[in-house]
Amino acid sequence: MDLGLDVNVTDGIPVVAVRGEVDFGSAPRLRELLVSTAMDGNHRVVVDLRAVEFLDSTGLGVLVGALKRYRTLGGDLLLVISTSRIQSVFELTGLTSAFAIHDTVGAAVEAAGT
């Protein structure tokens, strides 16, 4: 399955909806989108991973790199994860302590706005 990316703004916070597989071949597209969102002056972003079916180490690296970029700008990158498959990737790598992870886009947008 290919990677699908959509950006919507909710309460002033960009929400990047990711669908499909985030792997070695598709992760650069996600990286470009997250960098351009930051360069557009957004210091907080929500990445919605609810429709992601597969996430490899390259995809994790993109998210970690983007998290560092946003925090350097004084902002944050928040994740929305609702599937145990993707949640377990973050748990196994110990990244649940690095990212703010929410069950819903609404909860993540609310947290990002504060």
Image (cartoon, rainbow, N blue to C red):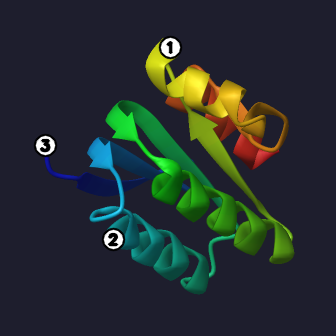
Mark 1: few/some/many CA within 10 Å (<14, 14-19, 20+): few
| Left or right: where 98 falls relative to 46 | right
**Mark linked to residue 1:** 3
Going by the numbered disc 2, the residue's amino acid type is Arg
Whichever of labels 1 and 2 marks the residue nearer the N terminus, that label is 2
- Residue 72: quarter of image: bottom right
Label 3 crowd (10 A; few <14 / some 14-19 / many >=20):
few
Q: Amino acid at mark 1?
A: Ser
Q: In the image, 85: left or right of 5?
A: right
Nearer to us in this view, 25 or 79:
25
Q: Is residue 33 above or below residue 78?
A: below
Q: Secondary structure at mark 1?
A: helix
Point out the image quarter for the C terminus: top right
The residue at 15%/51% (across/down) is 2
The residue pinned by badge 1 equals 84
> In x, y percent, where is residue 106?
56, 28
Q: Nearer the viewer, residue 79 or 28?
A: 28
Judge the density around disc 2: few (<14), some (14-19), many (≥20) Cα neighbours within 10 Å.
some
Q: Position of residue 63 (x, y in %)?
A: 59, 57
* Type of amino acid under label 3: Met
Report the residue marked by disc 2.
Answer: 29
Inter-mark Cα distance, 2 to 3: 15 Å
List the single residue furthest toward the top: 84
Residue ID at (71%, 61%) = 67
